[in-house]
Amino acid sequence: MIHPNVAELRESSRQRAADRPMGPDLSQVEDLHGPNGIPLRHDRTCRRIADACDVEVLAVDYRRAPEHPHPAAIDDVAALPGLRIPICPNTDLTLAHLTLAQPSVLDRGTGHAHRLAQTGAHVTHRQEPGLEHGFIQGMDLVSPEAATAQKRLFDDITALIHT
């Protein structure tokens, strides 16, 4: 098994994000820090959601594996107030036997969206066939299908918040 250089992958991801257009101008954008110094940022995707849905958006730069094992990322997001809208969460890891075979994924990596509904939380599940995980991150710039899916997402968020 090939083990990727995590630092290189993260730097590549940061560079791709920096290369994307900024997004709409907003009246206020702040970089903050949450519990334990967790960065809270307002990037292009958040700007687009804030603008399209007329809401304040707080994006959690949650801790990631392998340095921070599961459930660190979930703990980071759960520690902040307000409405949480997971977009493109890993909730169906049925390919775990092929690619995500770590014990934490196998033990705790399924059933989240179903468990939320059981608690009485409002859950809208939308699957976008043909779009890859993370389609919200700039794919609208190159894919009409992604742009249309993002519009549906923005409409869902607007309906949830403003009803």
Image (cartoon, rainbow, N blue to C red):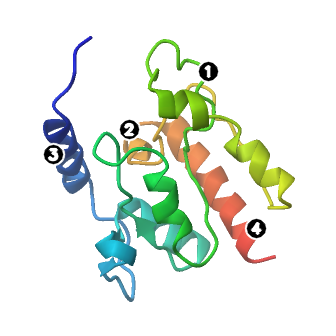
Residue at mark 1: 94
Q: Determine which quarter of the picture holds residue 34.
A: bottom left
Seen at 46% across and 20% down, the residue is 101
Residue at mark 4: 159
Q: Is residue 109 at least partly visible in the picture?
A: no
Residue at mark 2: 142
In the image: residue 7, left or right of residue 60:
left
Residue 145 in picture, x, y percent from top left: 55, 36
Residue at mark 3: 11
Dot placed on the residue nearer the N-terminal end, 1 or 4: 1
Dot 1 falls on a residue whose secondary structure is loop
Residue 23 in picture, x, y percent from top left: 35, 65
| Quarter of the image that includes the N terminus | top left
Within 10 Å of the Cα at label 4, are there few (<14), some (14-19), or many (20+) other Cα atoms? few
Within 10 Å of the Cα at label 2, are there few (<14), some (14-19), or many (20+) other Cα atoms? few
Near-viewer residue (147 or 97)? 97
Seen at 20% across and 36% down, the residue is 6
Near-viewer residue (40 or 77)? 77
User: Gap in Å between the C-alphas at discs 3 and 1?
Assistant: 28 Å
Q: Which mark is residue 113?
A: none
Residue type, label 4: Ala
